[in-house]
Image (cartoon, rainbow, N blue to C red):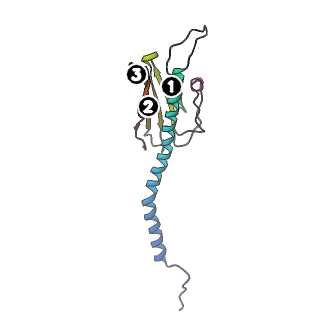
Amino acid sequence: MRKNKNAFTLIELMIFVALIGIISALFVPPFLNYLKKVKSAEAQLNIKKIADLEIAYFKRLRTDESGKELPSSFLACTPSPSMPSSMKKEFIVNEAWNELGFLPNGPVYYSYEAKAKGEGTFSEAIISAHGDLDDDGVFSTFSLNLYVDSETNEIKYSDISKINELE
């Protein structure tokens, strides 16, 4: 009987499949974490962009209908999109976001919100982003605080705090 030397044996195929499985087990989890880091970079960049717009809004001279100057303050903006998910969603620009001037570059993974309180030197704002990058119900949260330094009257901000960054 003559053996065909142009084919693989069953053992060779099984070894090949086992090697592919081992390589996948080693390299897929780090790759998935890398993808989450890339997606979370969106939140950090947009929070900084919103903070810059909030500072500009605070410094802008605003008047009411009668022409009376309004005290400086940060602007509160409702969450948009309302519920984050692992799929990108369109950012809904309402009146407050439009007044602030924030519009992200295309659909987003995170929901963005700006909470504001106080006026003048007692003004504060918290800008946050919430996301669920893998739809497991665990949210990653990024936030940045803005406040007016009472001694120098300068606007200061905290570092971005991260909770469950890669959830």
Q: Which residue occupies 45% across, 72% down? A: 15
Which SS class for mark 2? Answer: strand
The image position of residue 149, as x and y in percent, is: 40, 22
- Say few, some or many: other residues with alpha carbon within 10 Å of mark 2 (under 14 / 14 to 19 / 20 or more): many
Amino acid type at circle 2 is: Leu
Q: Residue at x 59, y 32 (%)?
A: 103
Q: Judging from the image, what secondary structure is the residue with disc 3 in?
A: loop
Of the numbered discs 1 and 3, the one sitting upstream in the chain is 1
Please tell me which of labels 1 and 2 falls first in the chain. Answer: 1
Choose between 98 and 140: the one closer to the eye: 98
Determine the residue positioned at 44% across, 33% down.
Answer: 143
Q: CA distance from mark 1 to mark 2?
A: 13 Å
Question: As rendered, which of 129 and 153 lies closer to the eye?
Answer: 153
Extent of the magenta region: 92-106
Give the farthest residue toward the bottom. 1
Would you say residue 10 sits in the magenta stretch? Answer: no
- Quadrant containing the C terminus in the rendered view: top left
Q: Position of residue 59 (x, y in %)?
A: 52, 21
The secondary element bearing badge 1 is classed as helix
How far across and how far down the image is residue 135, in percent? 48, 43
Q: Which residue was labeled with disc 1? A: 55
* Disc number placed over residue 144 in the picture, else none: 2
Rendered residue at 51%/21% (across/down): 58
Q: Is residue 15 above or below residue 154?
A: below
Q: Quadrant of residue 95?
A: top right
**Closer to us: 141 or 12:** 141
Question: Circle 3 sits on which residue?
Answer: 149
